[in-house]
Structure formats: structure tokens, C-alpha cells
């Protein structure tokens, strides 16, 4: 199992990593408005590490970010955990804004049927490069929970 990026910038997976599925994808296009959805469970978060939610699922360069929303289906648990959603460049390491959709959402807010509108710095801005969507938990591990992150953008 493993991954690497070749000289052309192509991200390569092999072994067990090759079989891992993306947590979401492009679900809707209405004119120039696009919607991405990612189903995320507590196990998908890595403490203080930004998890890329879909290797081949990206927001293109020049996209205008309309909104983001996190809808909790099953309450999250995890002591004092907080959650961030953001973007990384397609090289998988260079931060665009790791909490640009929303920052430090407290686990106490992640109750069943909660709907949390993103209010990060990326909302209402245009991207200058293509980007992958990331999620991260902070301060404590999440032990339970499931939610859907929805991102809407316009080309």
C-alpha cells in the first residue's frame, strides 16, 4: 500500500490505497452552478491532519464559491473536538485555506439534524487554482457521528 506523485504531478495509488473510495463527488450541475457532496463519518477525520475527502474530486480554477453547509445525520461525539473544512491545492500539500469553509465547529454543535452554514473566508471568493476539499478535527478525536458536507460553486 502506498501513494506517490510522479514527475508530471499525477497522484498515484497502489496496493490497499488504490481501493479506497472517495467520500463524495460532483452530484449536481444546474447551468453554471455545481454542487459537491461528501458523506463524512467520525472515522474519516484524522486528529490535526487535513484529510482530503476525494482524490479525484476537485473545485476548478476560477470557481466562485457560493456556499458550504454541513448537515449532521448522526450526532458527533468526542470530548472537546472541533472540526474544520477547507481546501488544499491539487499537489495535496499546499494550503489554500484549511478552514476556509468553516473553522472550529464545536462538537457540541454537531447534534443530529444540525445544519451548519459555512462562514469561512472562502465563501464569496473566486479560486485562483484548482483545489481539493479537506476536513480536520482538532483538540480531540471524534468517536461517533456522520454528516454531509455540501459545497456549491459557480464557474
Image (spheres, rainbow, N blue to C red):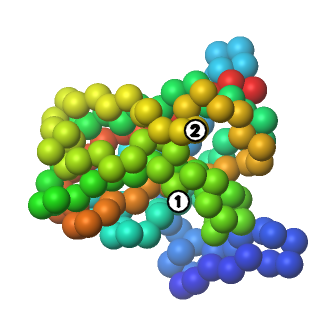
Instruction: Kindly state the secondary structure of the residue where label 1 is placed.
Output: strand
Q: Earlier in the sequence, mark 2 or mark 1?
A: 1
Residue at image position (52%, 27%) is 67
Residue at image position (53%, 68%) is 19
Q: Position of residue 3 (x, y in %)?
A: 62, 79
Q: Residue furthest front?
A: 121
Instruction: Bin the neighbour count of mark 2 within 10 Å (Cα to Cα): few under 14, some 14-19, many 20 and up.
Output: many
Left or right of residue 63, residue 41 in this image: left
Q: Is residue 2 above or below residue 100?
A: below
Q: Position of residue 89 (x, y in %)?
A: 68, 57
Residue annotated with mark 2: 122
Q: Are marks 2 and 1 in contact (CB under 8 Å)?
A: no
- Foreground pick, 22 / 120: 120
Residue at image position (52%, 45%) is 100
How far is disc 2 from disc 1 in space, using C-alphas? 17 Å
In this rendering, does residue 56 appear at all? no
Q: Residue furthest right?
A: 8
Left or right of residue 3, residue 101 in this image: left
Location of residue 79 (image quadrant): bottom left
Left or right of residue 49, residue 123 in this image: right
Residue annotated with mark 1: 52
Q: Is residue 53 above or below residue 128?
A: below
Amino acid at each position: 500500500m502506498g501513494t506517490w506523485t510522479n514527475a508530471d504531478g499525477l497522484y498515484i495509488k497502489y496496493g490497499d490505497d488504490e481501493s479506497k473510495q472517495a467520500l463524495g463527488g460532483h452530484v449536481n450541475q444546474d447551468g453554471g452552478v455545481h454542487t459537491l457532496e461528501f458523506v463524512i463519518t467520525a472515522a474519516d477525520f484524522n486528529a490535526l491532519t487535513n484529510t482530503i475527502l476525494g482524490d479525484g474530486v476537485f473545485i476548478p480554477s476560477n470557481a466562485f464559491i457560493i456556499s458550504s453547509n454541513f448537515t449532521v445525520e448522526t450526532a458527533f461525539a468526542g470530548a472537546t473536538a472541533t472540526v474544520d473544512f477547507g481546501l488544499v491545492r491539487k499537489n495535496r500539500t499546499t494550503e489554500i485555506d484549511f478552514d476556509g469553509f468553516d473553522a472550529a465547529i464545536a462538537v457540541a454543535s454537531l447534534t443530529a439534524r444540525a445544519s451548519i452554514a459555512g462562514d469561512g473566508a472562502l465563501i464569496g471568493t473566486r479560486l485562483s487554482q484548482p483545489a481539493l476539499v479537506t476536513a480536520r478535527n482538532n483538540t480531540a478525536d471524534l468517536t461517533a457521528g456522520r454528516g454531509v458536507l455540501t459545497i456549491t460553486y459557480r464557474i
